[in-house]
Amino acid sequence: MARVRRRTDLRRLGDEQLVELAAAGDGPALEELLGRHRGRLHAVCRRVCHDPDEAEDALQDALVAITRGLPGFRGGSSFSTWASRIATNRCLDELRRRSRRPEPVEPHAERLVRAAPEAAAPDTTAVRSADRDLLIEALARLPEDQRDVVVLRDVLDLDYSGIAEELGVPIGTVRSRLARGRARLAMELAPEGNRNDGDDVGIGEDRDD
């Protein structure tokens, strides 16, 4: 009975309280916290990795990383956003491993290249395996704030208001980061002689309007 009461009490707590308890070594609080977000994190991994088995591997890696990182979590963003970033990074690791093996082009890779059309040859209708490898590496090199928005918009298909809510920033900032991220992605994927090696990619700074 005490265990049931304890579980019910934990379900009433917010994420911030659960994070504090879990970071201090409270196992049931950790179980409740991860269980509360597992479905959403799994959905992120499925959409990014596309392959169910690799998505599950990325999810397990992410849950381990989240557990280990809890003591250092300072609440600069919501736990949901922080956990999603970790899951996305684990998916990128999985995609990099996958890119070393010949496979058909993934739909999310095509979407990302369409978001940066100047990076593809005019007669290219699909991304070859070599292009996918470059795409994955280029995405991993984006600044974290830009990568978050590119993945949320062009991979997970969230609308601007959903991304703004997820990241806790104004919609204007979402649009600016997305433009900068897509432009930088295009620059990274462009032939070496056509690259602009400076930080300025021709897009304005993030705006809070």
Image: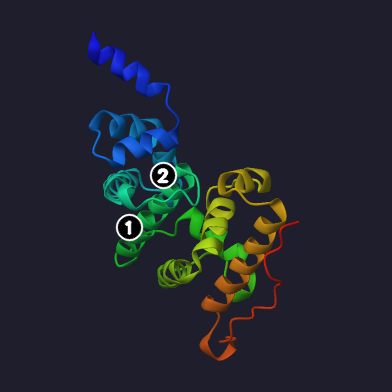
Q: Is residue 65 left or right of residue 199?
A: left
Front residue of 86/19: it is: 19
Disc 2 residue type (three-letter):
Arg
Q: State the image quarter where residue 104 is shown.
A: bottom left
Which mark is on residue 94? 1
Q: Helix, strand or loop at disc 1?
A: helix
Residue at 32% over, 35% down: 21
Q: Are marks 1 and 2 in contact (CB under 8 Å)?
A: no
| Picture layout, residue 56 above or below residue 8 | below
Q: Is residue 1 left or right of residue 141?
A: left
Q: Residue furthest right?
A: 209
* Mark closer to the chain start, 1 or 2: 2
Q: State the image quarter where residue 41 is shown.
A: top left
Q: CA distance from mark 1 to mark 2?
A: 12 Å
Front residue of 193/179: it is: 179
Which mark is on residue 59? none
Which mark is on residue 46? 2
Residue at 44% over, 43% down: 79
Disc 1 residue type (three-letter):
Glu
- Rate crowding at label 1 as few (under 14), some (14 to 19) or many (20 or more) other CA atoms within 10 Å: some
